Image (spheres, coloured by chain):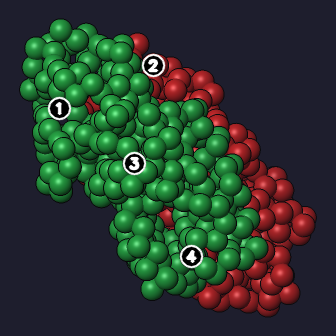
Chain colours: A green, B red
Amino acid sequence: MTAPLALVCGSGVLPLEAASEIRARGREIFLVGLIGSAGREIEAYPHLWVRLGEVGKLLAALRARGVSDILFLGAVTRPDLGDLLPDWGAIVRAGEIAKLIRGGDDALLRGVAQLFESEGFRIVGPRDVAPGLFAPKGEIVGPFPDEEARTDIAFGARLLEAMSPYDIGQGAVITAERALAIEAAEGTDNMLARVAELRAGGRLRLKGRAGVFVKAAKRGQDVRLDLPAVGPATIAAAKKAQLVGLAIAAGEVLIADRPAFLKAAEQAGLFVYGWTP
Amino acid sequence: MTAPLALVCGSGVLPLEAASEIRARGREIFLVGLIGSAGREIEAYPHLWVRLGEVGKLLAALRARGVSDILFLGAVTRPDLGDLLPDWGAIVRAGEIAKLIRGGDDALLRGVAQLFESEGFRIVGPRDVAPGLFAPKGEIVGPFPDEEARTDIAFGARLLEAMSPYDIGQGAVITAERALAIEAAEGTDNMLARVAELRAGGRLRLKGRAGVFVKAAKRGQDVRLDLPAVGPATIAAAKKAQLVGLAIAAGEVLIADRPAFLKAAEQAGLFVYGWTP
């Protein structure tokens, strides 16, 4: 019997979908729910609840179960030092943890990974253990993007690539080779809502459906951590923004709640295309 | 006596400030007010009102006055083909004009410039005729940015440079070498309002004042047209976003209503620094 894989769960359905896929592939799993982020559904599996900052408790539980591999998945609000309720395990690592709070999201996540690696654990990515969660290549929901849309997808891909060294650049809305909106700290749904507002307010004058949402992982991103994700809410926001479709990087972007996502895209008449990064 | 300079006026005070500076420098001026954009104050000068699309009327008026140089200044809402009330002059140039409506803002403006150049006019920039409108180098409103702010200014400058080929990238808010927001079609004030909202909603957890608004012209931008501008509203928005200051590219960014701008920055405790692009 191999040691269980520990899955540290933030919010959303992705951690549970990963748990299901991992178990289906025959691997034992142990879920660690972050209080305030993870859902109660994790309790269907062997699990432990921890607060952010309970580093000592978490390390002890992982060691007691013989865990060596850890997967992090789901959204966690960027912590503030003042929010943490550090236990002794966190306090003895306080210097390292304080460093994590500064810098971009990439720096934060790389720091978390390094902290666990320095304790002897191995960080795995969803690609290693649950590849079924990723966007496939090519047409995911039709119609196949037309030439104009393909031009905009290529434009968006180049733009995201250019912004990639700056620890941003996971999403943009492009129409007629023009960036209507670029995602930074606000997140995808807020960015798409902005496009909807700019259109409703008359600041963006576009006739009918226009614009492709282009999404990718950052080039320098640690693919074990913080991969971009889309889900049914992305479709709802893209529909409100009156886009023509979504172009997500195949093998890089996670699809949360895939059945609902596919159905929503079909109903909204939005294409979903997996472009090859 | 030299021929008058024609100043095609969009909205805001910049066209009037330019008119005042140009006249103070001893040049005759003829203002062309775009109906729906320019303010009534243009009537203090020799002037003509035109609608977007009244290309024939405008060309005839410019020729009747012996104009050879044209300056465009002030904001104009990106037109929709359906909004234009084209006159015969526009209709005979319809093919060129339709092309202008597509593509990025740069493409639109370059097209407008080319249209007038093909009619024998010379497009001048504010730098040629009203250099006093631009941000100077160095400290504009103190205090001098500290080391952290200077690091963020340099980071923002590199980021804007990287985005420059994509016809975007005139503004970003940076803190601790992290881009909180990037400006695209929404404009500076909307972007700064977003930072204020993300902070108020708890999505951005920053203690006290944080963040520098970094602004520049795009590298490939035609400096005769569509230069970025800041004004008192920028200060109000930056104050709401709880930033530490503004860093504007010296010689590239126009300052509208300078006395009110400087006073507002001082009262808000925001530094304004002219960085060298």
Secondary structure beneath label 3: loop
| Residue B191 visible to the viewer | no
Q: Are marks 4 and 1 in contact (CB under 8 Å)?
A: no
Secondary structure beneath label 4: strand
**Mark nearer the viewer, 3 or 2:** 3
- Cα–Cα gap, marks 4 and 3: 30 Å
Q: Marks 4 and 3: same chain? A: yes
Q: Which mark is residue A141?
A: 4
Q: Are marks 3 and 2 in contact (CB under 8 Å)?
A: no
On the image, numbered disc 2 is attached to which residue?
B150
On the image, numbered disc 1 is attached to which residue?
A52
Chain under numbered label 3: A
Pinpoint residue A177: horizontal percent, then vertical percent.
69, 62
* Relative to B147, residue A105 above or below: below
Image quadrant in which you'd find residue A67? top left
Out of A155 and B137, give the one closest to the viewer.
Answer: A155
Out of B164 and B33, give the one closest to the viewer.
Answer: B164
Q: Marks 4 and 2: same chain? A: no
Image quadrant in which you'd find residue A240? bottom left
Inspect the image, locate mark 3, and give the three-letter code of the amino acid beneath it: Gly
N-terminal label among 4 and 3: 3
Secondary structure beneath label 1: loop
B3 sits to left or right of A230: right
Name the residue at 21% across, 39% down: A32
**Mark nearer the viewer, 1 or 3:** 3
